[in-house]
Structure formats: C-alpha cells, structure tokens
Amino acid sequence: MTFAKIPDEVISEILKHNDIVETVGKYVHLTKHGKYMKGLCPFHSEKTPSFTVTPERQIFYCYGCGKGGNVIRFLEELEGYSFPEAARVLAEDAGIAVQGSWSSDDGGSHNPENAERAKLIEAHELTAKLYHYMLNNSKQGVEAKRYLRERGLSDKLIDHFMIGYATDEWDRLADFLAKRGFDLALMEKGGLLSAKTDGSGYVDRFRNRIMFPIWDKDGKTTAFAGRIIGEGQPKYLNSPETMLFTKSKIVYNLHHARTAIRKSKQAVIFEGYMDVIKSWSAGVKNGIATMGTALTKEHCAIIRRQAEEAIICYDGDDAGQAAALKSIPMLEAAGLRVTVAVLPKGKDPDEYIGEYGPDEFLREIVDQAVSITKFKLIYSRKNHILLKEEGKKNYLLEAVDIVAELSSPIEREVYLKELSREFDISLESLKQDCHRKVQELQKKKPQGDNNDNSWNNGRNEKRRTSGPPAILPAYTHAERRLLYVMMRDKEVAEAVHNRIGDAFNMEDHAALAAYLYAYYAQGHESDASRFVATLQDDRLERTAASILMIDSDFPFDETTMNAYIRDIIRVPQFKEIERKKEEMLRAERSGNALLAAQLGLEIITLDRQLKDRTEE
C-alpha cells in the first residue's frame, strides 16, 4: 500500500464524499436488514448473503470470506486497484482534484517500475492513435480499410474500437517514438519494437497488419493484436507478455462492456476480438473475450466481479464446442450461472452475423442460449450416428449419464421425457437407468458433502467444519469489544493506553491498538472508517472491519471497561499458572518431589496475586 503518498485531508474528503452504500450498490444488490445492508458477496461464491455493509460506520465486511474495510478498500479488492488507484477513481467520481504527486499515473520518482509502466502506457496510447491515423489517412491503409469494410465493419465501429493499420515499413513506429523521446530499449521490453539481430537498433514489431488495441480494465492501451494483410505468417500476431499485458488476466473489451454487464448481470464470452466487435454492432454490448489463450481461473474471477451469469458463445466447430465444455466447470467454480449459445456447425459469431444479420444472431443464438445439460446433450449427439441402432443406443446411454448429474429430480424427469418422446423409448426404462447412475454418483461423493455440484462448495471449502464453531476465549471477546469502543471513542482509547498500552493478548489486536494510539496522537478525531484507511496491512484491515461489525447494543461504562482490562491483563498469569501446573505434573511423574513442591508453592503465589488483582 502507498498510503503515505496521499495527504490525510484528501483521504478524509474521499471518504466523506463517497458513501459506501452508494458505491457498493453499483456492484452488489443490497437489501436493508435493520441498521445493516446485506447482499451476496462479490469476492466469493455464495447463495446466502453474508456480505454486510454498515452505513453508520461506512464499513463493509463479509462473514464468509473475511474481506472487509472502507469504501477505498472495497474498490481495491473488487477492481484489483492499488490503494492510490482506488483513491484516485473515487476522488474523480466525487469531483476532488487529483494531484500528480499521489495519483497512480505518477509515482515515477518513487518507484522505477511505476515510471516504466507509465511510459509504456503513454507509448501504447500514442501508438494506437498512430495506427488509427494510418488506417484512415494513408495510401497504405486503403487496402486494410477495404478489408475491414468487406468484413462488415462500419467507420463508426472502426473508430469505436480504435482499429488501425501498421504500415509495411521497418521503422515507422520506432522513428515515431524516438522523435518523442521514448527509450527504445524500454519500448522493446514493452512489446512495441523488436531488437535487430545484429544489435544495431530496433525495428517495428508489427508491420503490414490491421491493428486491434487491447485495453486494460481502465481502458488504457496495454497491448495489440495484429492481423496480416494478404499472405504471410503468422496470420495473427499478439503483443508478447509484458509488465502491462498478461494474457491470462486480460479480458478484451471489459471497459466498454462493464456498464452493460452490470446492468444485465450477464456477460457474453466470445473466443476472439473480431467476434466481440461484430457482436457489438449486432447489439451485444456485454460481449467480452480472452486474448490468444484459453479461459483461465483469473479470467473467471474477473468476470464474476462484474456478472452473475455467463453466456458462452464460442465457434460452432468441434474445437469451439470442446473449448466451451472445458470452460463450463471453471465458470461455475467462480460462482457464475452458465448457459451456452449454440452456433451451427462450422460457423463463428462473426460469420453468422455476416450471413444472417444482427437481428437473427440476437434472436436465434444469444437469446436462445441453452442450459449446460442441454448443451452437453447436443455435444454428445454430434459424436454418434443416430441413424444406426448402435449409435442411438450409445447416445441414449451417454445422455442418461449426463441427466443423472442433475441434482433436481424434476429437471431429470424433464430431460428424460424429451429423450423418451424423441426416440420412442419407455420413460420407465430411462428412469431406471438414470436412478442407477444417480446412486453410483452418490456413492462416489465425499462423506459429509451432500451436493458435489454446488457452485458454492469449492470456493468456501475453508468454511466447512465437521463440528460446531470454535468457542473463543473470554478475553478475546473483551479485547474485541474494547477495541470496538476505542475506535469510536478517543477518550476511552486514551484511558486504555494509560492502563495497558498495547498489551493485548491477540497479536492482531495489539497491532490495531498501537495503530489506533498513533492515529489519535496525530490529532485525528474518532472516525472508524478514516482509521481503517490508515492501516497498511490487509489482515489488520479485515480484523478492524470484523470488529466494527460487532453489535453495538452491549453495555459499556467505566465498570465494564475495567472488567475488560482485568480479563486482558490476567491472561498471561493464567497461562503461566497452567504452564507451571504441567511442569509440576511432569515432576511428580518423574519422582522429583522437591521440584514438584517448589512449583506448587509458585502456583499458590501466582494464584494469590491473580486473586488480588481481580479484587482491585
């Protein structure tokens, strides 16, 4: 975290002008529960809301995954921002002036890597503009423009996606960047240029290609995809992985599609950028794609932060359908409901739109997305020759196995009835085979897990226990309640500081107390959300948020405070007495009566001291 770069008064203004309920509400559907707001956690999969927002304290906390903090921390976690980036976004939303000395685009004097990133982003943005200019305003770009129009891309679409053209010259971009003072070695490191084999300089990485900018989540150009004009290899060339561009973490078009995705709670996932672009022209504003790689867990996590449902719309060929089948469990594991838009064999979205038009693509493909079970049946069907009895039998056996995976008896019967009608097979016989398969699957399930297919299970494995939750020691409750009041009452914090300092028994509690004393010593008044913003440790932020979610109805006065303090300071003596009792037991067992007697006297002394302190 780079908290020190941001002035205290700026953070205070950010927190003051960005209500946490309003900000969180843009991402999570919240409902009122007394003085709290609750919803499904955007950070992990769950069916029962455990994500809680407290308007009074401007804090969020999830009882499922343990994430918590203030509005800045929420944006950090959700969008993957650094602390300064999240603060900058919220500041801009609130109309607060962003100073270069702490904005995420600066940082050059503080961190060399940040300076390189900033330079590379600047260079990529300029390069995108150069390529776009060359497509629209150069003789060399005429053929590329003609090709794009033949593919059905209008000028408006070309401008929206900033499609460009890299000329066939060896050093057009290298010369362009050099004249603007960019370090060409850094540009090679960032994937824009390539070093000459003789080490004498640099040449353009992309030449004679239609160029598609690849943006990060904030809409900044971080890489390119290039398609060659005419003959040549490779046909498609992407930027290499760099400090800006990691294929497994980049979702193409996310910054354009984010608003539509959040509004519809759906994301349509395509295989490539051209499918996204053509589907955008067809009205699919929530379309995204991976870049030159199969879907990854990182992609799925990014999509889950924006959507609740994923519609897979891959190519209709065997490779595309196989890729869809592999993607389904990954998307489910991320907590997304999944359906599949099935294209005719051999067609991709781009081709389908070009042949049948945008309206039919929406009506017949996207809007008719089928369930996972239906897709598996369609996929299985393609692998069998149904005109032959053997093929029909093998398909039906495979289909029953697929249906048996469903947890709902009603859903199973719906699909079995369809199979029965289509193939004129007795429904009873299909049910018998399906029931036998269901029993086999039940036997294979791990004991204690009643729903192997639950999308909530995998992500929450750590929360499953075989017995009742652990009972926390009394002193832990005393420390948490005391810290809760201390974060909300400066005078109580000062009184506790004078009595016990940071001598809390839980390590995180002691650290929080130390930070809190420093916070008040700097002249700050009681403000729990503001205090959490000063913490420079993720675990402490979560601990603080968890403590601030305590029900505030418990009584608290000077007598209660003294009782809590007594509970806290007695713990080390209790532990010392227990340790000596164990030593005395070992001494007795070994026949060392003298040592056992000595330890017995020490225990009596400690017991008396403890009793005296309790009665103080």
Image: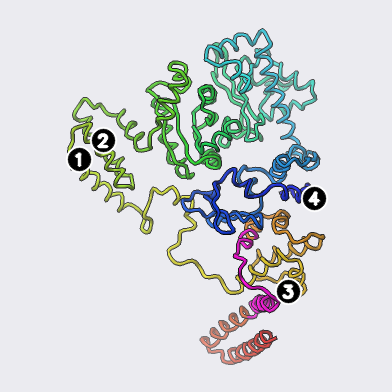
Characterize the local packing of mark 1: few (<14), some (14-19) or many (20 or more) Cα atoms within 10 angstroms: some
Residue positioned 78% across, 40% down in the render: 98
What whole-number distance in Å separates the C-alpha atoms at marks 2 and 1?
9 Å
Q: Which of marks 3 and 4 is nearer the N terminus?
A: 4
559 relative position to 438: left or right: right
Q: Which mark is residue 9?
A: 4
Image-quadrant location for residue 425: top left
The residues tagged by marks 3 and 2 sit, at their Cα atoms, a distance apart of 73 Å
Residue at horizontal 60%, vertical 22%? 212
Residue range (magenta) = 544-573
Residue 357 relative to residue 108: left or right: left
Q: Position of residue 174 (x, y in %)?
A: 73, 20
Please tell me whether mark 1 sits on a helix, a strand or a loop: helix
On screen, 467 above or below 238?
below
Nearer to the camera, 605 or 59? 59
Amino acid type at circle 1 is: Leu
Position in image of residue 195 (x %, y %): 69, 23
Identify residue for label 1.
427
Q: Which of marks 2 and 1 is nearer the N terminus?
A: 2
Q: Would you say the magenta stretch is mainly helix, strand or loop?
A: helix
The x, y position of residue 612, in whole percent, is 68, 88
Residue of label 3: 500
Label 3: few (<14), some (14–19) or many (≥20) C-alpha neighbours in 10 Å: few
Asked if residue 602 is positioned above or below residue 219 in the image, the reply reads below
